[in-house]
Amino acid sequence: MLLVIKMGGSILKEGASSDLLSDLKEIAKEHSVVLVHGGGAEVSEIATKLGKEQRFIMSPDGFRSRYTDKETIEIYTMVMAGKINKQIVLALEGQGLSAVGLSGLDAALLKAERKLRLIAVDERGRKKVIDGGYTGKITEVNVTLLRLLMEKGYVPIITPIALSQDNEPLNVDGDRTAAIVAGVLKADKLILLTDVEGLILNGERVPKIASTEVKEVLFKIGGGMSTKVHAGLEALNQGVSEVLITSGTAKQPITSVLNHKVGTVITNE
């Protein structure tokens, strides 16, 4: 079975990270695994220390994202690919796994089209068009490289930074990166590890839900989870059989969610 797992960059700082790592070690013995990681909070923290205050914008669909100008993409690349990615590599190597840290720039792993314009919504709900900065939408994945690494027993760890058509680094959304990678690899499952126990509706966890039902309740879902759900739907549309959303700090989070004991399962059924 082929699994694509998206984890937040802060998960390794959590108290239960050792449980996640040991669980990942056992999973990787039987299945092929590709990891995609985030780390936005640490980017903001270090950027502020460097005197570069971070700006966030809201899209008309309710997605909150970092506005990435030239100075920000340099800091983003430094922290994500240079610090967080290598911390995860070290953590996995410490578990005896052969991990390879990659950004989307390496061997043009992720190619993206730069967004020339963005539509942002202000506090009063007014829309305005702004320069797209250094953000992009993934157009191509170097599947050959990922398959080669997995065939040789390596666990690829991907930083969501893509290569533009003008040879520039671009900030691409981590959840959508994981979804696209899962789709092009024809992965069996996409697992999105987050800081909550799954999709919550009316104060309760939803154990399982069909993609058609999800579309009907999207307006009830908060911004952070909405991004993950949209990514999940994108993966399902590309042929991934199941999308699993669960807390990365739960006990044996990957094994438990694969067995449908925790989290939320989204399917096309």
Image (spheres, rainbow, N blue to C red):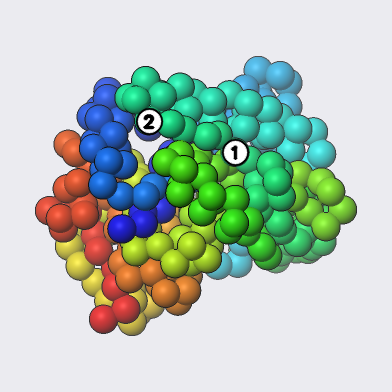
Viewed as shown, does residue 171 lie left or right of 149? right
Secondary structure of the residue carrying tag 2 is loop
Looking at the image, which residue is at 20% across and 46% down?
255
Q: Which residue is mark 1?
A: 102
In this view, the residue farthest toward the top is 49
- In this rendering, position of residue 118 left or right of residue 183: right
- Which percent across, then down, holds residue 267? 29, 73
Q: Earlier in the sequence, mark 1 or mark 2?
A: 2
Circle 1 sits in a helix, a strand or a loop, which is it? strand
**Which residue is more in the foreground, 113 or 120?**
113
In the foreground, 225 or 256: 256
Residue lying at the far front in this picture: please name it.
152
Which residue lies at the image location 45% right of the left edge and 49% below the top edge? Answer: 151
Residue that label 2 marks: 97
Distance between mark 1 and mark 2 Cα atoms = 15 Å
Point out residue 133 in the picture as x, y percentages from the top left corner: 79, 50
Q: Are marks 1 and 2 in contact (CB under 8 Å)?
A: no
Counting from the top left corner in percent of width and height, residue 247 is at 27, 44
